[in-house]
Image (tube, grey):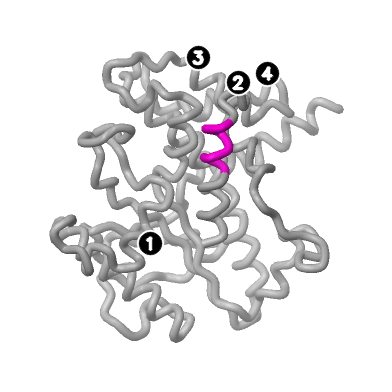
Amino acid sequence: MHKECATLYLVKSVVLCPSTPAPLVFNLVLAATIDGDFLPDEPSTLFHNAADIDYIAGVNDMDGHLFTGLDVPTINSHLLHTPVNDVKRLLGSYTKEKGLAGMESGFLTYSSTWGTNPDQETIKKTVVEIGTDYIFLIPTQAALYLHANATIGRSGRTYSYLFSEPNRMGGLVLPYPSWMGADHADDLQYVFGKPLSSPLGYWPSHRDVSRYLIHYWTNFAKSGDPNRGLDVPATWPRFDSNSHQYLEINSKMNRDYVRQRLRMRYVNFWGNILPQLSLLKFL
């Protein structure tokens, strides 16, 4: 809930200050933070304190849309062209500490699946993928690996997920294009049972995914194991640094929705390739 409140405050600040530079995420300094005595050290060094605590972390597949839709507004219109230079500009903002080499390496990574003539939907989706990875997925994956490694020989369990139920307004209401996945905070209505309490506003498939999330989260809250208790559509495996398994959650899911190596090409870029560029600069 704290994260959502911080996001709402952030959006409000941008409305009041239209001259705020892009990308939007850089203005998170305006949000509340907790440090000092509450967090006595860098969070990445403190996971040994949670080695006996069960842990679930994940992202929505288009978590960054809320932010990148303001950074690159053309992605939300099928009538407006999103130039490739906008992809490079956004990447350059996120990799600016590494200079031109950072942007070029990032663009090479994110355009590697484009082919020779990418269509506009591909380019627009890539913008959202970049924002989703940078703001949400990469930090979450880093936390999952830190927790999983800290629990070796201890009792804590680690679980990873990707929520991919498409936004129900996709293609119907601005600013949601027809190709929309799950935007930032889209999962909350399902976790808290809105499709079950307000059935006329949702399809049966929405009620299905709401039950799935409620069952997984309830089981986890009771036992530390999302599979133990209420019925679930797939057995959710533990995450570790060897198998890299995670669960993709949506209304169509079944046992085949256990996946591996979530966006590893991009996790490797942000976690390994990009940091090495800064080292090369000083050799």
Indicate the quadrant where residue 114 lies: top left
22 w.r.t. 155: above or below:
above
The C terminus appears in which quarter of the rendering?
top right
Magenta stretch prevailing secondary structure: helix
Q: Which residue lies at the image location 81% right of the left edge and 25% below the top edge?
A: 281
253 w.r.t. 75: above or below:
below
- CB atoms of marks 1 and 4 within 8 Å: no
Task: Work out how far the residue at label 2 is from the one at label 1, CA to CA, in angstroms.
Answer: 32 Å
- CB atoms of marks 1 and 3 within 8 Å: no
Q: Which residue lies at the image location 54% right of the left edge and 65% below the top edge?
A: 240
For badge 2, the amino acid type reads Glu
Task: Work out how far the residue at label 2 is from the one at label 4, CA to CA, in angstroms.
Answer: 6 Å
Q: Residues within 10 Å of mark 4 (few under 14, many from 20)?
A: few
Q: Which residue lies at the image location 72% right of the left edge and 27% below the top edge?
A: 98
Task: Work out how far the residue at label 4 is from the one at label 3, CA to CA, in angstroms.
Answer: 13 Å
SS at circle 2: helix
Judging by the rendered image, the residue that carries numbered circle 1 is: 247
For badge 3, the amino acid type reads Asn
Judge from the rendering whether residue 214 lies leftward or rightward of residue 34; answer left or right: left
Of the numbered discs 4 and 3, the one sitting upstream in the chain is 3
- Residue 165, position in %: x, y? 29, 52
Task: Work out how far the residue at label 1 is from the one at label 4, CA to CA, in angstroms.
Answer: 36 Å
Judging by the rendered image, the residue that carries numbered circle 3 is: 85
- Residue 94, position in %: x, y? 62, 31
Indicate the quadrant where residue 84 lies: top left
Magenta stretch bounds: 10-16
Foreground mark, 1 or 3? 3
Judging by the rendered image, the residue that carries numbered circle 4 is: 100
Judging by the rendered image, the residue that carries numbered circle 2 is: 104
